[in-house]
Amino acid sequence: MKNYISGKWLLGESDYTVVNHNPSTGGLISEWAAADEAQVDQAIQAAKSSFIPWAATELEERIAILRRFAEIAKDHREELASAIQSEAGKPKWEALQEAQAVAGKVELSIKAYQQRCASFGSAPSKVRFRPHGVLAVIGPFNFPAHLPNGHIVPALIAGNTVVFKPSERVPLAAELMTRYWIEAGLPEGVLNLVQGEAQTGSHLAENEKIDGLLFTGGSQLGEHFRQTYAQRPEKILALELGGNNPLVVWDSDDPHSLIQLILQSAYVTAGQRCTCARRLIVPQNKFGDDLLKSLRIAVGKMRTGSAHQVPEVFMGPVIGASTALKLVEKQQVLESEGHTVLNRLRITKEGTGQLTPGLIDGSEASEIADEEIFGPLLQVRRAKNFEEAIIEANRTRYGLAAGLVSASEKRYQQFRSEVRAGIINWNKPLTGASGAVPFGGIGLSGNHRPSGFFAADYCSYAVASLESPKMEIGTPPPGLALK
């Protein structure tokens, strides 16, 4: 894999090698040297040198380049989907969904910028919006194209320049997207790509010369950045983190659709979406008993396996063999704490990320840790009444997503007003989200800077001015007259 710095493709020059494997097969995809500290500095300097001319470029000209990028990404969606399928382990149907979302982000971001960052006011007061400067974008493995693209596009519209560090698990998807930007005519230095692992990311995120960090990833690293940037108030920090998300299922007269909703909420992308349901909260009654019986059968029937399998599977592998082993170990820990396994999470092919989905009941557990288990392991909780279900839903330091399944609008109104989360769905899969609305959470799930439609907000800042073509100071206050 190569880095793209100041208009040139360069090999990494560090003394450590990154090895990338296909999570479906365990086979080697690529082996490459990461960008070292000097190359990261070079990328930041290139972005810094390009900032003033890019910010001075007319908005319509910037938008024209972004629209060309969208067309190129649309034309190459099969190519991009193939990279996502091999690197991230997504089945082709899901990889294509993500690849298609790359182009769609452009028009949504243009609309967001025009709505939220348009100059306004009349003489003598005027408000305009300015870009921050050089923004570092660090992307995740689960959406290697869509999620970093959700930072990069609004950042470029606003006039920022970007240094992009993707997850080391998905280097090809990042390289392809960079090539699409080049083909679209983005000037040299406006977007720079540095490939590498944690060391490369640390060199970038903690470099004094960047003006901000847009990060998507785990809450532990997010908390580290929170503490680091608390000492740097001059820099913007936008965190898009995970969640210990509750899905409360209280009543339904459509059992078939209900099961589909739960499966999509908990197991799509092998449970590796930050909005996936982690806790299923159901009533302690016959409805809850029957639901769990039906859910156990459905989980056992779910088609899983390789992302390259024909016919296609619903759930592909987790990101790698080591991740699969950690999930099995986590299941064992939960068992030791009193959780009852209803469907056991198992590795189906050694040396890969292929797993069966897990379902585990923690209603009688002695300990219930508040953590995000990033994989296909759904935990069940039983509640005596709806008030107890809401208490259970809020029993977390996270606050990304929450959902309710119920025919009662009154119940939903109570749920929506009392549950703390940035995304609250009603009778919809928890993993459903629209690019036309904000996307983000509170607590350990973010820092009150949601992305999605509101990404425009953290990619620029407002400048308020009092203006007059002639000097005007008005009547001097008492004691200031000079005559």
Image (spheres, rainbow, N blue to C red):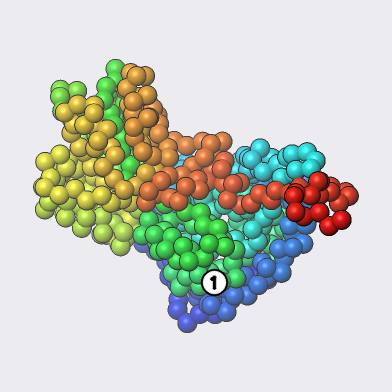
Q: For the point 59% across and 58% down, which residue is it? A: 176
Amino acid carrying mark 1 in the image = Asn
Q: How many marks?
A: 1
Q: Secondary structure at mark 1?
A: loop
Q: Residue at x 11, y 41 (%)?
A: 364
Q: Mark 1 packing: few (<14 Cα in 10 Å), some, or many (20+)?
A: some
Classify the position of the N terminus by image quarter.
bottom right
For mark 1, what is the residue? 207
Q: Position of residue 406 (x, y in %)?
A: 32, 22
Q: Residue furthest bottom?
A: 15
Identify the residue at image location x=55%, y=58%.
Answer: 236
Image quadrant for the C terminus? bottom right
Q: Who is closer to the viewer here, 176 or 207?
A: 207
Q: Is residue 161 visible?
A: yes
Between 443 and 328, the one lying in front of the other is 443
Along the line of sight, which residue is nearer the eye, 420 or 6?
Answer: 420
Q: Is residue 59 left or right of residue 169?
A: right
Q: Provide residue 185's location: percent of width, then percent of height.
A: 74, 57
Relative to 374, does residue 437 appear above or below in the rendering? above
